[in-house]
């Protein structure tokens, strides 16, 4: 399956993800955003419900538990994909612990282990007040007035749960202001640095989750981090009363081995226009905006064809999502003759240009 | 009209894609500590998300209700004090460079050497990384805990990574006094295995190099660079 071509392209994805970084500074040129790279390992199933509980003997304190649960809700609420959902479950295999983490580096404030996926994961928080060589760890939630340099446990929790759902580290913004594009920064941000209390995945995190786990619906918007090409096709049905014809356009994501589960997705609920021009003309005019068709990604319009004309369907690149617009090949529809491959149609002839 | 999620039978793999499984091959040898189904905690299972409105006890008790933080509780009532200085500095060697504190990375984890400046090779201190299915996260590391290298302003610097092939990298620097990397600026970036960039402006700086590896994983390494 197409998944198998992705690992060979992973270095390219990672390289692009990295090269996108530092783009907002004066030193580096502005480059296109690319999705957060995957952490690697076995993904969860689509929409898999993954429970977690507190590790016995290392139960997070009462001020921390709500932040962790909020981070899980943040992940569920901002995944914009069919990534696994996370929720507390007292009988779950996955464990979240506090103090004396066993899988963290000695200088880490938190860590995650997803090597047990798709069965389980672990997340560990270092304890508040722990003295590292880099300073004393302070979780903001442990204080009624947050101290300078504290870490938001919900933000860090979302970052760790991002690792759990297979997000690696995004390095595109260590030195820039674009760190809002990803919560998966390799530098944990402290109050009051920008992004210290992000509670949603960034668009580049969502872009990877969509590639790994697919869209929630065919009408859902694609992340604006990166671009996803589309393909438009157009067909005309047989002639009806008065020369009317039903045109059917189909819009889908183009096949691309680097976009994982998004390839070939039907694209529903977009604005697709049907355009016409007189044969020999170079000027197109929009006839109508096509209505949603009976199948996913299809759009239909019935119009009268009274002379030989060229027809095409157009999906313009939308400004608010990552899809790239596309235009169908041209259909020549004539009541008296047909150009190219003709459709079986009484009265009118249809064929691609 | 069908607008719902993908229908059964349409090209989707219900289980681990082969490429991801391959990436996890090493990771799967690591047993997730504690994932053995121990008895559930007796703590409240579904705590309501939200922030505490009263002073918080810094204990691991699951349902501590009595605030009353007492010394040496970390609870404080103002936000004015800056984050404390490092509690220790890397010990100096006879030639003035620092010894790298161990970050206890996993077996086989790549190392990085900063090459340039005086010509010496100076090992980097690992911050955040992902490796074999494990992610470990740190803040910006301050100069005091890092190995020190010297360079002239604008000197070419390189980083050699041993144990992994670099797929892409970025480098950034912040003044050493900037303990959170707030003022970090880019030094360079690249998509190939070679990591090279110019030393920052004169003064004490912390340099961060973040690299992603072919086949998965990444690491952030830090150095303290004294630029003449």
Image (cartoon, grey):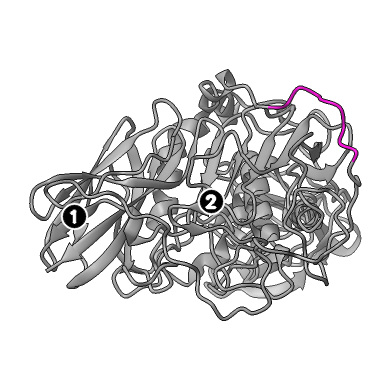
Q: Residues within 10 Å of mark 1 (few under 14, many from 20)?
A: many
Q: Which mark is residue A36?
A: 2
**In the structure shown, which secondary structural element does the residue marked by tag 2 occupy?**
loop
Q: Which residue is mark 1?
A: B149
Q: Of A99 and A182, which appears nearest the observer?
A: A99
Host chain of mark 2: A
- Comparing A273 with B219, the one in front is B219
Seen in the picture, residue A133 relative to A316 is either above or below; the reply is above
Q: Position of residue A149 (x, y in %)?
A: 55, 69
Point out the image quarter for the N terminus of chain A. top right
Q: Which residue is rendered at x = 17% and y = 54% of the image?
A: B157
A77 vs A123: above or below? below
In the depicted structure, whether residue B205 falls above or below residue B120 = below
Residue A129, can we see it? yes
Q: Are marks 2 and 1 on the same chain?
A: no
- Mark 1 falls on what kind of element? strand
Residue at x-position 59% and y-position 58%? A183
Q: Is residue B60 left or right of residue B152?
A: right
Work out which residue is located at the far left of the displayed protein and give it: B118
A314 vs B158, left or right, is right
Q: CA distance from mark 2 to mark 1?
A: 31 Å
Span highlighted in magenta in the image? B34-42
Q: Main secondary structure of the magenta part?
A: loop
Q: Residue at x 31, y 51 (%)?
A: B90
Query: Is residue B39 highlighted in magenta?
Result: yes
Residue A219 placement: quadrant: bottom right
């Amino acid at each position: 399956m197409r998944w198998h071509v992705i690992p060979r392209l992973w270095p390219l994805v990672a390289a692009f993800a990295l090269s996108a970084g530092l783009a907002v500074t004066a030193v580096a040129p502005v480059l296109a955003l690319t999705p957060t790279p995957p952490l690697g390992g076995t993904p969860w199933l689509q929409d898999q419900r993954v429970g977690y509980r507190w590790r016995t003997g290392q139960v997070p304190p009462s001020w921390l538990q709500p932040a962790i649960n909020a981070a899980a809700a943040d992940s569920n609420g901002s995944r914009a994909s069919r990534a696994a959902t996370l929720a507390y479950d007292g009988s779950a295999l996955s464990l979240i612990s506090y103090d004396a983490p066993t899988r963290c580096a000695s200088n880490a404030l938190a860590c995650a282990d997803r090597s047990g996926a798709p069965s389980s994961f672990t997340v560990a928080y270092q304890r508040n007040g722990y003295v590292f060589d880099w300073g004393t760890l302070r979780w903001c939630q442990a204080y009624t007035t947050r101290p300078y340099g504290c870490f938001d446990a919900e933000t860090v929790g979302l970052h760790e749960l991002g690792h759990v759902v297979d997000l690696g580290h995004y390095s595109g913004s260590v030195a820039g202001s674009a760190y809002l594009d990803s919560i998966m920064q390799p530098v944990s941000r402290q109050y009051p640095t920008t992004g210290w209390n992000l509670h949603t995945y960034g668009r580049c995190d969502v872009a990877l989750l969509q590639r790994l786990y697919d869209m929630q619906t065919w009408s859902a918007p694609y992340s604006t981090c990166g671009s996803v090409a589309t393909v438009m096709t157009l067909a005309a049905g047989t002639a009806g009363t008065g020369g009317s014809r039903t045109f059917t356009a189909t819009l889908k994501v183009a096949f691309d081995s680097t976009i994982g589960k998004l390839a070939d997705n039907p694209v529903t609920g977009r604005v697709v226009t049907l355009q016409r021009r007189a044969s020999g003309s170079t000027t197109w005019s929009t006839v109508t905006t096509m209505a949603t068709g009976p199948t996913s990604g299809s759009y239909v319009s019935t119009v009268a064809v009274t002379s030989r004309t060229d027809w095409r369907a157009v999906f313009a690149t939308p400004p608010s999502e990552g899809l790239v617009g596309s235009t169908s090949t041209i259909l020549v529809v004539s009541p008296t003759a047909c150009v190219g491959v003709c459709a079986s149609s009484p009265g009118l002839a249809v064929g691609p240009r | 009209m069908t607008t719902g999620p993908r229908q059964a039978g349409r090209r989707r793999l219900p289980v681990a894609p082969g490429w991801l499984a391959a990436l996890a091959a090493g990771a799967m040898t690591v047993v997730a500590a504690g994932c053995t189904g121990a008895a559930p905690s007796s703590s409240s299972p579904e705590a309501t998300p939200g922030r505490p409105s009263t002073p918080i006890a810094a204990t691991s008790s699951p349902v501590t209700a009595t605030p009353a933080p007492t010394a040496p509780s970390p609870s404080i009532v103002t936000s004015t004090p800056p984050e404390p200085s490092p509690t220790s500095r890397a010990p100096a060697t006879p030639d003035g460079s620092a010894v790298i504190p161990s970050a206890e990375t996993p077996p086989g984890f790549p190392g990085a050497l900063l090459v340039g400046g005086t010509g010496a090779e100076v090992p980097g201190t690992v911050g955040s990384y992902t490796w074999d299915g494990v992610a470990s996260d740190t803040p910006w590391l301050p100069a005091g805990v890092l190995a020190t290298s010297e360079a002239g302003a604008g000197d070419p610097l390189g980083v050699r990574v041993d144990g992994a092939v670099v797929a892409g990298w970025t480098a950034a620097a912040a003044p050493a006094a900037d303990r959170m990397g707030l003022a970090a600026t880019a030094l360079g970036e690249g998509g190939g295995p070679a990591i090279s960039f110019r030393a920052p402006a004169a003064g004490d700086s912390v340099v961060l190099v973040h690299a992603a590896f072919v086949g998965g994983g990444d690491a952030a390494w830090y150095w303290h660079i004294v630029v003449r």
